[in-house]
Image (cartoon, helix red, strand yellow):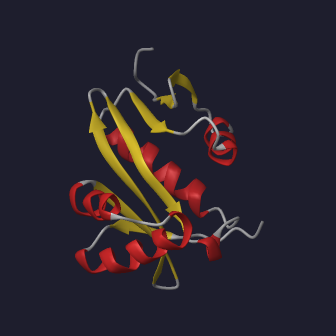
Amino acid sequence: MTYRKAEIRPFREEDEAVLFGLASLDRGADFRTIAVLERETVFVAELAGAPAGYVALSRVDEAIRIDQLFVSPEHEAEGIGRQLLEWAEGYAISERAARLEVVVEAGNRRALEFYRGRGFAESGENLLALQLPGSIS
């Protein structure tokens, strides 16, 4: 793995088409991808001035939920996903959320390993959660 430090910044309107295109490379982006980009809190990871991935977050009760975390296939294994996840955790703490959650399908071993390796635990059907500092379990 070659680690590359990304600049993480808030989503800008002009990012929409590029991020939709990146998401299309991996999972076939659709109308839901556009809705997420337009309505949720989105942070973009940039390398050399170009988007390399993004994380989309929403508030669900006392939690911040990761709705989408995507890294461009050309930047996989460079630490971008981990940086986006750390940013999401910091954002959730700043929003005084009790936990950071993510929905992962049971068959998605790669995603399950990624989140479990970073402290997430089962919290419901297809739901993983990370208890945040200062929250009561």
Rendered image quadrant of residue 21: bottom left
Report the front residue among 48 and 101: 101
Percent x, y of residue 132: 45, 29
Residue 41, by quadrant, is: bottom left
Where does the N terminus fall, quadrant-wise? bottom right
Q: Could you tell me which residue is drawn at 26 percent across and 53 percent down?
A: 40
Number of numbered labels in the structure image: 0
Is 32 situated above or below 135? below
In this image, 134 relative to 3: left or right?
left
Q: Residue 126, how many percent across, how many down?
A: 52, 31
- x and y percentages locating residue 60 in the rendered image: 29, 33
- In this view, 100 is above or below 43: above
Q: Residue at x 52, y 85 (%)?
A: 48
Q: Residue at x 50, y 29 (%)?
A: 129
Residue 123 drawn at (x, y percent): 50, 22
Position of the C terminus, as image quadrant, is: top left
The vertical placement of 56 against 72, above or below, is above
Q: Tell which of 23 and 9 is nearer to you.
A: 23
Name the residue at the top extreme. 137
Residue 50 in view of the camera:
yes
Residue name at image x 46 percent, y 28 percent: 133
Query: Is 12 drawn above or below residue 103 in the view shown?
Result: below
Taking the image as drawn, is residue 95 in sight?
no
